[in-house]
Amino acid sequence: MRIALALLAAALFAAPALAAPQCAERKEAATALARLQDAMAEGRFVAYQPTELRVWDGVPTRASEASIRDDLKALRPWFDSLITYGAHSGGERIPAIAEELGYRAIVIGIWNPSDEAEVAAALAAWKAHPRLVVGVSIGNEMIFGRRGTWDDYAKAIAAMRARAPGLPLTVTEPFAVFLDDPAAAPVLAELDFLAANIHPVFEPWFADAPPFNWADFVVKAGARLGAEAFCGPVLVKETGVPTAPEAEGFSKEYQAAFYRELMVQFPPSRKLAFAWFSAFDAPWRAYDETPVPGTHPEEAHWGLFKENRKPKPVMDVVPKL
């Protein structure tokens, strides 16, 4: 499925430009959205899942507050903003701990928008930390992973909007899904900002191209989203290079080279920015749950830090805040 999407993405760059999308202004969410854009332009986001949170046979383990605090302490010298994946199994405690440690912004992920307990936990975190929580990302690759439909997204957005009109909302899919699927348009029109995944490693040309081209691809894909799919802020939620398996052409050196080049080509702005992906390695992901069907051993090695919170060489590339 990744290869099919990669080929589709390549074709998209040769397609004619579409008309600029229309935007509706939502005044209730304007204040929080401005804080999100400030963090995009002036801060540094990282996609984070607690190191203690693992999923075995579909059942998540619970991350302790102490472990989450240690995770966020390890990240804080380099990052001041977070994107999470779920408000469950300890993830609901991330905003409180992040506020203690001086983080400036969090986009809370809701993994399962049909889980009322998870939705309620995300809303409770927003109400308790209204200046820190700048948005909610509903689902993660639900369309691409065949875990839901655009109608499911639309219903979840409407329900969340009714309960929290001042909270900026987004959904996350690979960028080509947003660009190519006509059914995405009604959902995109209801969002306050767009979270997209742009992974050059899944493109067929990746292994033969230099880091300059990897970064150039991310920049151009992000710009095209802003020109053709969505008129509000675009935050690239996932991009990067895993550090293994070596047999598939991944390495610590390639990861560092990619981000070194991306920082040159992709200066953040209020309109378009990227999050570093991902905070920590997750070895369990090679054996159990992944966002999409199939075997993806690279899922275990996206981290900027190892599972024991030791920084990889890429962090020598990243200036401390």
Image (cartoon, rainbow, N blue to C red):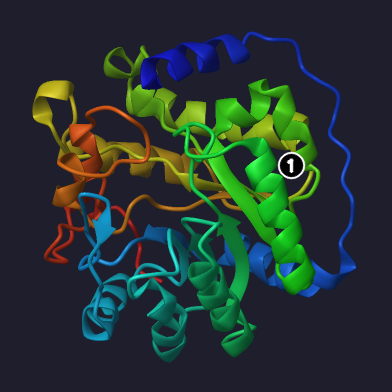
User: Which quarter of the rendering shows the C terminus?
Assistant: bottom left
Image point (79%, 37%), residue name: 186
Callout 1 amino acid: Val
- In the image, is residue 130 above or below residue 37? below
Name the residue tied to disc 1.
Answer: 187
Label 1: how many Cα within 10 Å (few below 14, some 14–19, many 20+): some
Viewer-proximal residue among 38 and 177: 177
User: Which quarter of the rendering shows the N terminus?
Assistant: top left
Image point (70%, 32%), residue name: 184
Image point (38%, 72%), residue name: 91
Is any part of residue 270 visible from this angle? no
Tag count:
1
Q: Position of residue 94 (x, y in %)?
A: 40, 77
- In the image, is residue 296 above or below residue 111? above
Position of 278 compared to 156: left or right?
left
Position of 245 compared to 257: left or right?
left
| Element type where label 1 sits in the image | helix
> Residue 166 falls in which quadrant of the image?
bottom right
Q: Position of residue 98 (x, y in %)?
A: 42, 81
Q: Position of residue 22 (x, y in %)?
A: 89, 39
- In the image, is residue 203 above or below residue 251? above
